[in-house]
Image (tube, rainbow, N blue to C red):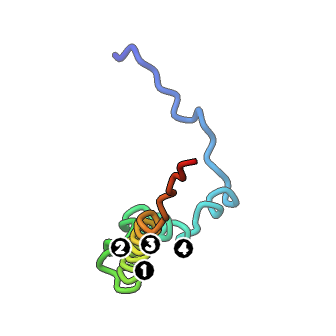
């Protein structure tokens, strides 16, 4: 004979209202698809619009750096006057 006793009726079964609350299969499928699909489909540089935007940002940064460099070279050197 076994020394262990199991009480199978310890927890009551849920009623029909509680069971129907968890029968939202649309929500189940949505959560499953959200959990299994990747965060993004393509890398940013492979999407044409995003790639053009990134190229424009890089060109704008280069233009600003070039203009700042030219402005630095064009500053007149002050000439000291001897009294």
Residue 61, image x, y percentages: 42, 70
Residue 26 image label: 4
Q: CA distance from mark 2 to mark 3?
A: 29 Å
Closer to the eye: label 1 or 2: 1
Q: Nearer the viewer, residue 42 or 29?
A: 42
Q: Nearer the viewer, residue 31 or 58?
A: 58
Sort mark 1 into few (<14), some (14-19) or many (20+) by Cα contacts within 10 Å.
few
37 up-or-down from 4: above or below: below
- Which of pointers 2 and 4 lies earlier in the amino acid sequence? 4
**Residue at the limit of the structure toward the front, as seen here:** 83
**Circle 3 is placed at which residue position?**
67
Q: CA distance from mark 4 to mark 1?
A: 37 Å
Residue depicted at 51% across the width and 34% down the height: 8
Check contact, mark 2 vs mark 4: CB within 8 A: no
Sort mark 2 into few (<14), some (14-19) or many (20+) by Cα contacts within 10 Å.
few
- Identify the secondary structure beneath mark 4: helix
- Identify the secondary structure beneath mark 3: helix
Check contact, mark 2 vs mark 3: CB within 8 A: no
- Identify the secondary structure beneath mark 2: helix
- Which of pointers 1 and 3 lies earlier in the amino acid sequence? 1
- Which of pointers 4 and 1 lies earlier in the amino acid sequence? 4
Q: CA distance from mark 4 to mark 3?
A: 57 Å
Q: CA distance from mark 2 to mark 4?
A: 31 Å
- Identify the secondary structure beneath mark 1: helix
Q: Quadrant of the N terminus?
A: top left
Query: Position of 46 compared to 57: left or right?
Result: left
- Which of pointers 2 and 3 lies earlier in the amino acid sequence? 2
Q: Nearer the viewer, residue 38 or 34?
A: 38
Residue 53, image x, y percentages: 42, 80
**Circle 2 is placed at which residue position?**
44
């Amino acid at each position: 004979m076994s020394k262990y006793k199991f009480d199978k009726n310890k927890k009551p079964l849920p009623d029909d209202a509680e069971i129907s609350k968890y029968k939202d299969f649309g929500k189940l499928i949505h959560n499953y698809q959200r959990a299994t699909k990747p965060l993004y489909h393509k890398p940013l540089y492979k999407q044409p619009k995003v790639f053009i935007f990134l190229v424009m940002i890089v060109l704008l940064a280069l233009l600003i750096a070039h203009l700042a460099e030219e402005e630095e070279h064009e500053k007149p050197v002050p000439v000291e006057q001897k009294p």
